[in-house]
Image: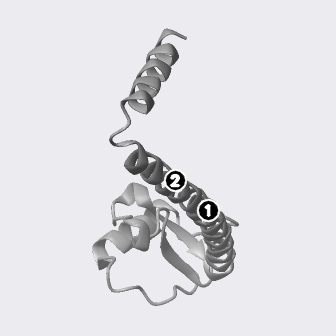
Amino acid sequence: MGKITPRKEHISERTRAEVLKRDDYKCVGCGETNNIQVDHVVTWSLGGGEELLNLRTLCRKCNVKRTRYLSHCADTINKKIDRAIERLTKENKELRKTCEILEVLFKSAENNSEVWEDLYRYEKSKKKD
């Protein structure tokens, strides 16, 4: 058996031993037996627990690759979220402008029954289509 890096506190010693034994004390990514560690498949920060199905043995090199990949994915997702927020903010501003215009129109038409009748006929015709 090769060198095993120190454990993280939230994985119990018993669970850690079970995972290492199950994975034959080898990295499941490359087969390395040195500098191995128990890793969460679904990361702890995303709610991954310490169930055996969510744990695996990785060497430090494979774990670093995975961490970098996850970091890249998080950056990509954050950029997409930022673009979506920008788009929604723009759409929200346009919607607010439309609401302001409608508010002015409705206030000016409050006592004008012809406008209300026109609006009613328009809405009724839309429902027929």
The residue singled out by tag 1 in the image is 90
Q: Nearer the viewer, residue 48 or 124?
A: 124
Looking at the rendering, which quadrant does residue 21 occupy? Answer: bottom left
Query: Which residue is at a point 51% across and 62% down the rendered structure image?
Result: 23
Frontmost of labels 1 and 2 is: 2
Which amino acid type corresponds to the residue marked 1 in the rendered image?
Lys
Query: Which residue is at a point 65% across and 73% down the rendered structure image?
Result: 75
Q: Nearer the viewer, residue 61 or 118?
A: 118
Looking at the rendering, which quadrant does residue 1 occupy? Answer: bottom right
Query: Which residue is at a point 62% across and 82% down the rendered structure image?
Result: 60
The residue singled out by tag 2 in the image is 101
Q: Is residue 118 shown above or below 7?
A: above
5 lies left or right of 8: right
Helix, strand or loop under label 2: helix
Looking at the rendering, which quadrant does residue 120 occupy? Answer: top left
Return the mark for residue 122.
none
Quadrant into which the C terminus falls: top right
Q: Is residue 67 shown above or below 98?
A: below
Query: Which residue is at a point 56% across and 62% down the rendered structure image?
Result: 93
Give the percent coordinates (x, y) of residue 43: 46, 69
Give the percent coordinates (x, y) of residue 112: 38, 36
| Mark 1 or mark 2, earlier in chain | 1
92 lies left or right of 116: right
Give the percent coordinates (x, y) of residue 95: 53, 53
Helix, strand or loop under label 1: helix
Residue neighbourhood size for the residue with mark 2, other residues' Cα within 10 Å, grouped as few (<14), some (14–19), many (≥20): few
Kindly report the distance in space between the C-alpha atoms of the residues bearing marks 1 and 2: 17 Å
Give the percent coordinates (x, y) of residue 6: 45, 90
Which amino acid type corresponds to the residue marked 2 in the rendered image?
Ile
